[in-house]
Image: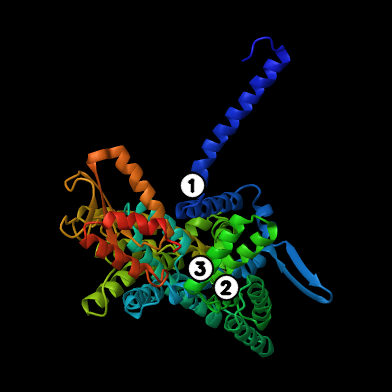
């Protein structure tokens, strides 16, 4: 502090320093919160919190406020056209349509360019998904009483993807990349079947004119891509009108969401589109004006499919807003007055629990293992039978889809309450069973469900390009492409590592040209090989990276 300052100035500086320290502390505290929210565990944590709030609220002295809230009428009116529903239906028919729209986008992406675009990789997840629906239904029907309960078999077919992946992040192995992809492929099949069942089994009477209008809108949505429409707004507008048509047709709105997502295709970025976006971005860097920036932004948007852009925009809303709000609206069951006791002794409650907790792991494990042994395919690398069984156990968390079908399948409030209790118990038991199975699998040597983390081919001084002592204890292997800008940046990192670790570090370069993205990468790699034959590989290595644009 500078001497000679007045007391007021000293106090002001002290307060400023205090505010600065407070802001810094707040930033430090906010960082782990943001990291938590960015994970699947964060989404599942919000969902779990919403369930807890709903149950506490519904069983508190303010339970009437909870009930009256979701029966509050809300309307949208444009001229003489008017749509009026209570908040519960706005959540289940409105927000959940958006939820299934995001799922439809994800399914179409996986089919187009993701894990389901290769038929050989679909067989085992397909058999596992089929088993994970048939076995739960059979067990449910074996335990459930007849009548209305027998018609509610759809409660046990679905899996809550967000909740399941969140539980996997908490109770699963440390590394689960391969298992996660495998389970996602299964849930894709679950979601398609679940929405189909909702549309065919649990919808009301069908109005033909609105149904025809919905089909026409589906054709229009599919045609937008064929005509090269890359703006997201037309797709969103058509899907919104499709939602109205499906709703008035008597089908559940989830059909509109899933169908809309499935009809918006995804594609890998083309080389021309990426190159054009790169040129526009460089133009903005040279001339950072608003009009140039607008053109560059359009170029970047056109390089990425509408499907992926909509996923990026809507996925956080789906995970962190829609699903928790749905849980808040549907998980609030008043368990007072002997309701919980009656539910725990009801065959319907335990039919749901047995179907999800026992049927899901048996069906998924049986379908996957039997398919693999029959030679129809194989499990992903790094995924063992214990991992499949543990993932199948977590798939017994039906929650979102199950609660939605409970609301559609049961008119009787007592039966609806018993089924809801079964879904909540199943989520708890499935999580505990998954934790137990993963621990037992780890004891049998099935630890990480991931790709191998050791070099497939050890470093060979006679064939590999090595910079540094060949016997150095620290090794960095790069699979590089001379036309890749990210690889060029990595060369700077390797220089810093060599300066820091000296003779304890060796850098190994292996060729991995990507001709689909970089048309000159293979030519550059051949030039580097030719230089290596003359003992001058590293000179050519640096030269190629320094002149990537040429």
Q: Residues within 10 Å of mark 2 (few under 14, many from 20)?
A: some
Q: Secondary structure at mark 3?
A: helix
Of badges 1 and 2, the one in the foreground is: 1
Where's residue 492, x and y in %? 38, 48
Q: Secondary structure at mark 2?
A: helix
Of badges 3 and 1, the one in the foreground is: 3
Where's residue 428, x and y in %? 42, 56
Residue 279 left/right relative to 502: right
Question: Which mark sits nearer the N-terminus, 3 or 2?
Answer: 3
Q: Which residue is mark 3?
A: 275
Question: Which mark sits nearer the N-terminus, 3 or 1?
Answer: 1
Which dot marks residue 418? none
Q: Which residue is mark 1?
A: 35
> In front: 303, or 134?
303
Q: Which residue is mark 2?
A: 408
The quarter of the rendered structure image containing the C terminus is: bottom left
Q: CA distance from mark 3 to mark 1?
A: 33 Å
> In front: 321, or 363?
321
């Amino acid at each position: 502090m500078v001497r000679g300052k007045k007391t007021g100035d000293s106090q002001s500086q002290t307060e400023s320093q205090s505010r600065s320290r407070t802001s810094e502390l707040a930033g430090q505290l906010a960082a782990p919160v943001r990291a938590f929210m960015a994970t699947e565990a964060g989404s599942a944590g919000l969902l779990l919190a919403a369930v807890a709030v709903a149950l506490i609220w519904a069983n508190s002295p303010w339970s009437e406020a909870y009930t009256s809230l979701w029966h509050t009428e809300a309307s949208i009116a444009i001229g003489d056209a008017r749509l009026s529903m209570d908040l519960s239906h706005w959540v289940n028919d409105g927000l959940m349509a958006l939820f299934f729209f995001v799922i439809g986008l994800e399914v179409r992406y996986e089919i187009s360019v993701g894990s389901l675009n290769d038929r050989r990789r679909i067989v085992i997840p397909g058999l596992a998904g089929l088993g994970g629906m048939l076995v739960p239904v059979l067990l449910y029907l074996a335990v459930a009483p007849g009548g209305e309960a027998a018609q509610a078999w759809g409660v046990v077919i679905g899996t809550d993807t967000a909740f399941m992946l969140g539980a996997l992040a908490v109770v699963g192995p440390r590394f689960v990349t391969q298992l996660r992809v495998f389970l996602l492929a299964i849930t894709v099949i679950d979601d398609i079947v679940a929405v189909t069942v909702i549309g065919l089994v649990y919808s009301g009477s069908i109005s033909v004119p609105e149904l025809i209008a919905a089909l026409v809108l589906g054709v229009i949505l599919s045609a937008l891509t064929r005509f090269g429409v890359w703006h997201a707004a037309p797709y969103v507008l058509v899907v919104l009108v499709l939602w109205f048509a499906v709703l008035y047709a008597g089908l559940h709105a989830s059909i509109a969401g899933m169908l809309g997502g499935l009809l918006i295709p995804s594609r890998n970025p083309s080389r021309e589109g990426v190159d054009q976006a790169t040129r526009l971005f460089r133009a903005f860097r040279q001339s950072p004006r608003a009009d140039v920036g607008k053109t560059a932004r359009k170029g970047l948007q056109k390089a990425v499919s509408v499907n992926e852009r909509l996923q990026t925009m809507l996925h956080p809303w789906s995970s962190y807003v829609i699903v928790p709000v749905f849980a808040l609206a549907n998980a609030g069951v008043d368990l007072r007055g002997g309701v919980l006791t009656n539910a725990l002794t009801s065959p319907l409650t335990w039919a749901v629990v047995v179907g999800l907790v026992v049927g899901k792991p048996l069906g998924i494990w049986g379908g996957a293992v039997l398919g693999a042994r029959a030679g129809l395919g194989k499990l992903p690398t790094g995924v063992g039978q214990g991992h499949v069984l543990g993932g199948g156990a977590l798939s017994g968390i039906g929650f979102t889809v199950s609660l939605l079908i409970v609301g559609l399948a049961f008119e009787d409030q007592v039966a609806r309450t018993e089924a809801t209790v079964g879904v909540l118990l199943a989520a708890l038991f499935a999580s505990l069973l998954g934790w137990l199975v993963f621990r037992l699998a780890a004891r049998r040597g099935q630890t990480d469900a991931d790709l191998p983390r050791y070099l497939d081919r050890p470093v060979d001084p006679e064939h590999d390009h090595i910079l540094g002592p060949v016997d150095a204890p620290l090794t960095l292997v790069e699979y590089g492409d001379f036309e890749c800008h990210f690889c060029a940046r990595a060369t700077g990192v390797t220089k810093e590592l060599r300066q820091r670790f000296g003779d304890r570090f060796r850098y190994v370069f292996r060729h991995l040209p990507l001709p689909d993205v970089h048309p000159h990468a293979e030519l550059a790699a051949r030039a580097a090989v030719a230089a290596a034959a003359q003992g001058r590989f590293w000179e050519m290595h640096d030269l190629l990276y320094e002149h990537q644009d040429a």
